[in-house]
Image: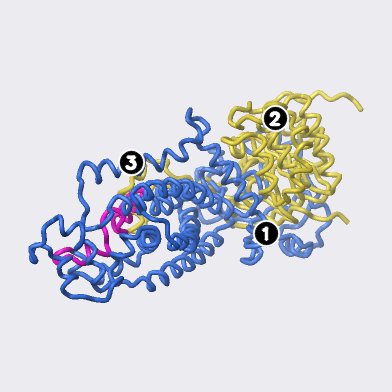
Chain colours: A yellow, B blue
Amino acid sequence: MAEPMVVVDDLHVVYRVYGSGSDKGTAATALLRMVKRQQRPSIREVHAIRGMSFVAYRGDAVGVIGRNGSGKSTLLRAIAGLLPAEQGMVFTLGHAALLGVNAALLENLTGEKNVILGCLAMGMSPQTVKERYQSIVDFSGVGDFINLAMKTYSTGMGSRLRFAIASAKSQDILLVDEALATGDAEFRVKSHRRIDELRAQAGTVFLVAHNLGEIEETCNKVIWLEKGRIVQAGENVPEIIDAYLAATGGEPRVREPK
Amino acid sequence: MTNRGRLSAPGELTGPDSRSVPGELTGPGSLGGPGGPPDNGGPAGRGSAGAAVLAAEPAEVYLAGDAIPAGELLSDYARRHNLEPASARPPVLKYLRMLWQRRQFITGFATASNMAMYSEARLGQLWQVLTPLLNAGVYFLIFGVLLGINRGVPGYIPFLVTGIFVFNFTQRACITSSTVMRQNLPLIRALPFPRGCLPLGYVVIELQQLLLSFAVLFVIILSYGEPITGYWLLIFPILALQTLFNVGCAFILARWGSGFDDVSQLLPFIIRTWMYASGVIFSIQTTLALIPGKVLYNHPSLAYLLQVNPAAVYITLIRNALLTDQRTSMPGYHQYNALRCAMYGDPAKYHISSAVFSSKVIYFSSYCHPVVSVPALWWYAAGWAVLTAVAGFFFFWWAETRYGRG
């Protein structure tokens, strides 16, 4: 029987956004508020995930699709344990590692330092890091840039290196949030192979992508989100993608008959 | 825990018919609920009003197939398969073990950050030495050359520079760690590791810088004719205790600063006040406490509070270890002598010329009663270090799962 790796139980996530009003919080007003124990007047709540439940099993690659702001990234962050739930809970077997598109890990440091420190932070021993260093760098394909500060990297190079680091340790659960979108064709092939490997090592992969072809090729299950809720989810990946495309007014995908 | 709805085949709820009206697509639970929910201004905008009830209805369980026995709660199902809450805080001992296991990361992170700090300056790593040197130079210029006063303290310039360097260690550890969680958000969001590594790493960065600035300090005080004595060895236990204290401060400020920017905005003001209250520029042991008419002379309990504040404790102990003038003019160094103590406090009354005062009588503060004795200072040094480190650790650990949100 399939072993569950991620159980999302009636999850609600609410963001509290500060500083949307005119109050910018000078030192004096901040002190006054701390003394009076007042909340900031300009807190706005954004209810990003509005109740969803699903289960992902060992070996699943789950694609998450939906329009901008539908809660895809929030869901991944919640699974990674980075966002506390307002209600409900996320259960995982082992730790989930999240890969996003934004800035570098330690952008002032060289790629080399990022690889070494990233691996140490994940709890590898210095010996293991030394052994795996070359394969990580080779996989990332950043070449000579490994000796330059990571802030000098192009978006694609940065995300390649980050993917290489995070996938160096066999994670139980890997959450990929558009991190592959900026890679070139060669890297996509490589990263797909790596995701397949991770699945084969009996991990679970979540993939957020607007490139629906990528989802269709990589994932065996798909979840379609809309306004923080699941619209459809299942193993019939092409059907759900077609339904999503029709609903959002996209062109239907052209598939070659198998 | 909420009840789970009955299972259904994946995708059963919404057929292809619903595809035509994207705004109206219904997930389970969007039926809304009673109670007039507040519109929380969800990103979706139109159509979201009325749907934002937290406990409206248990959500449909997707992708589960028929794996979950009917009637079993989803949370029970998860626990039965040994799944754990995604944002669970590890127990204290395990957390400490995790931190210890990451020690190479902590030191590596500190060293690399230190190296990268001046990578865009033409003088590069030279700034590591130039910064403390210039820092001391500014104070020398203002207090040594322009004002030219001793403020009742023998060997004023070494006294001042030592105080500044020691205080700077705690000051920088506090200020940098108040922004550590927000500055390293990408790292926190990308990789799983105990977050306590980051404030610890920042303290190590400051410790490395302190060692360099102490090299500068040694050159300065040696050039003022200070002999190297066995007392110098005392700086190791003192700095170790101060580091422990800084770790505690870093933990506390890292958590406070993780949510809002307000803390790091306010902190410089607090720290500057703290600096003046800790006797970096004036002596709170002698000048301010022994001279009749000064505030601390009139309020001994205030003098006591200032002298046992952690920054003052570490500064005083380091000064006494490194500087002979400070050690021998410390109240309580000699047996109490009422006349000599009074001569220090009010030289005009005894018609002491300023030349005699600054060469001899300025040391007579050592004949006064100390407000806080040197052994007591050591107890305070250890107490502050342990108390702050333990409290800071628990305070930081308590919110372990909350870092990185936003």
Above-or-below relation of B281 to A23: below
Dot 3 falls on which chain?
B
Q: Residue at x 21, y 55 (%)?
A: B151
Above-or-below relation of B115 to B90: above
Tell me the amino acid under the disc marked 3.
Answer: Gly
For the residues marked 3 and 1, what is the alpha-carbon distance in whole angstroms? Answer: 55 Å
Other residues around mark 2 within 10 Å, as few (<14) / some (14–19) / many (≥20): many
Q: Do callouts 2 and 1 point to residues on the same chain?
A: no
Asked if residue A23 lies left or right of residue A73, the reply is: left
Mark whose residue sits in front, 3 or 1: 3
Dot 2 falls on which chain?
A
- Between A133 and B403, the one lying in front of the other is A133
Above-or-below relation of A83 to B297: above
Stretch of the chain drawn in magenta: B266-294
- Residue placed under numbered mark 3 in the picture: B137
Asked if residue B154 lies left or right of residue A1, the reply is: left
Cβ atoms under marks 2 and 1 closer than 8 Å: no
- Between B353 and B399, the one lying in front of the other is B353
**Residue B84 in view of the camera:** yes
Residue B243's disc number:
none
Dot 1 falls on which chain?
B
Tell me the amino acid under the disc marked 2.
Answer: Ala
- Residue placed under numbered mark 1 in the picture: B85
For the C terminus of chain A, give its image quadrant. Answer: top right
